[in-house]
Image (spheres, rainbow, N blue to C red):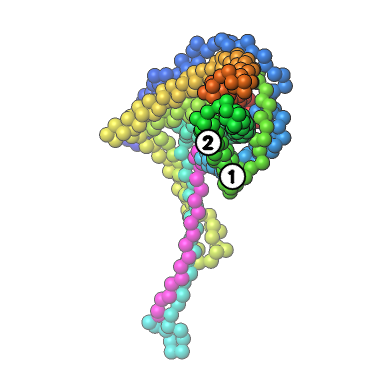
Amino acid sequence: MQSVFRLILLSTLGFVLAGCGTMLVPQKSGFSQQAALQDIPSSWTNSKQPYASGVQSLRSLTNDKALLAYIDQVLEQNISLRQSELAYQRAELERQKAAGDLWPNLNLSSTADRSRSKSQQAAPGQKRASYANNIGLDASINWELDIWGKLADRKKAASAEGEASQQDLKAARVSMVAQALRDGIELASLERLKSLEQSRITSLRRTEQIISDQFSRGLGQLSDLEAARSATANAEASLEERKLAIAQLKRRMQIATNGIPTGKLRLGRKMPSIQLPKGDYPAAMMGRRPDILAAFERAKAADSTHSASYKDMLPSFSITLTASDQAPNLSDLFSGGPAWRTLGSLTAPIFDGGTRRLTAKQAEIDAARGWLTYRQTILDSLSEVENGLQSEGNLRRREAMLTRALRHSKTNHEQYERRYRDGLTDIVTLLSAERDAFTARQSLVNIRSLRLQNRVNLAVAFGLGL
C-alpha cells in the first residue's frame, strides 16, 4: 500500500513538473530591443564641419587654466555629484542583497536555564533544594532551490540596475562639467557685455560734450543735449542690469563648488577658447553615452523582473535541515550526536485572486515601457547631435555676417559723428548710428557665446567623457 501511494505521489509530482516546464517561457513584452534599434543611421546628415584634432574629452575642449581649475573644484565638491555617488553605492548594495538570496540561510539559536527544586524528604541539616542546569543549541539551514531561475533573474535585474546607476553617475559628472564650461562661457560673455556698456557710456558722454560744444557755438539745440543725456541714463541702467546678472551667476557657480555664495569669483575675465569636437558614427556614439547605456540597463532589468514575476506563479522548492541538542554543561553539547531533521517542501500557488498573474502582467508592461524609453533616449541623442552639427554651421555663418555688420556700423557711426560736428545731420540720427554700432558689438559677443556653448553641447551629445 505504501509503495502504491509513493508511486502515485511521484507520478503526480512528475506531471506537475512537466506542466511547469511548458510554462517557463514568459510572454514577450510588446516592445523589444530589436524594435528599439531599428532604422539607426550609419552616418550623420550634417557632418561637413572643420573638426579640431586631439579633442577626446570635455576637459580637452579648452586650455583655459582658470576654467579647468574651477571644473576640478566642481568635480570634487559638488553636492549633487555626492548624492549621485551615494545612489550608486546604494544600488550596489541592492545587487549584493539579490546575489545573497541564492545562498542558503544559516540560523543559530541558543538557550540556557537554571531551575531550583525543593526536596521534601531531606534529612535535618541537609539542603532542602537542588539545582539543575540545561543548555540548548539549535542550528537550521534553509535553502530555496532556484530550479526555475527566478532568483537568478532577480539577481540579473539588480545587477542591471546597479550598472544603470553607475552610468547615471557618469552622466551626472559629464553634465556637471558641461554646465561648468557653459557657465564659464556665459560669465565671460556677461563681463564682455558689461565692458561694452561702459564703453558705450563713455562714448555717449563724449557725444554730450560734442553737443554742448555745438550749443555753445550756437549750432545746436538744448533738446539735443537732453536726448543724449537720456541715452546715457538708459545705458547706465543697462550696465547695472549686467552687474546684477554677473553677481547672480557667480553665486550660482560658487554653490556648484559647495562654496558660500558671496558673488566673488575670479573667473570670466576673457572668453575661453572652445574647440569643435569630432564625434564617432551614430552606433559608436550610442555605445559611449551614459544616458543611453543607463536606459539600456534599466530595460534589461525590467525584462529580468518580468521573467522573475512570471516564475512566481510556479512551484517553489526548499530544503530545511535542523540540528539540536541539550545538555547540562556546554562541554557536553553534541557529545552523543545531535538530533537532526531534514525537510524538503514543495509550495505551489493555487489561488491568490490573480495577484501573481496581474503582477506578472504589470512587469510585462514595465518591460515594454523600458524598451520604449531606451528607444526615445536614442532618438533624442541622434537629434541632439544633428542639431549641434547644424547649429555649428549656422552660428559660424551668422558670426561672419555680424562681423561685417559691426565693421559697417562702426564706419557709419564715425561718419555721422563728423557730419554732426559740421551741422549736416541731427542728434537723432547720430544717436541711432551709435546705438546700431553698440548693438552690432553686443550681437557679436552673444553669437560667439552661443557658438562656444553649442560646441560644449555637441561634445556631450557625442558622448565624450571627462
Question: In which quadrant will I find the C terminus?
Answer: top right
Relative horizontal placement of residue 271, taking residue 153 as reference (left or right): right
* Residue 76 visible to the viewer: no
For the residue pair 315 and 287, the one nearer the viewer reads as: 287
- Say what amino acid the circle numbered 1 marks: Gly
Label 1 vs label 2, nearer the camera = 2
Residue range of the region highlighted in magenta in the rendering: 96-119
Specify which label sits upstream in the sequence, 1 or 2.
Answer: 2
Residue found at x 67% / y 35%: 269
Q: Quadrant of residue 348?
A: top left
Any magenta on residue 100? yes
Tag 1 secondary structure: loop
Which residue has dot 2 on it? 233
Tag 2 secondary structure: helix
For the residue pair 26 and 421, the one nearer the viewer reads as: 421
Any magenta on residue 434? no
Q: Quadrant of residue 355?
A: top left
- Say what amino acid the circle numbered 2 marks: Ala
Which residue has dot 1 on it? 263
Vertical position of residue 95 compared to residue 118: above or below: above
Percent position (x, y) of residue 131?
Answer: 46, 75
Residue found at x 46% / y 15%: 35
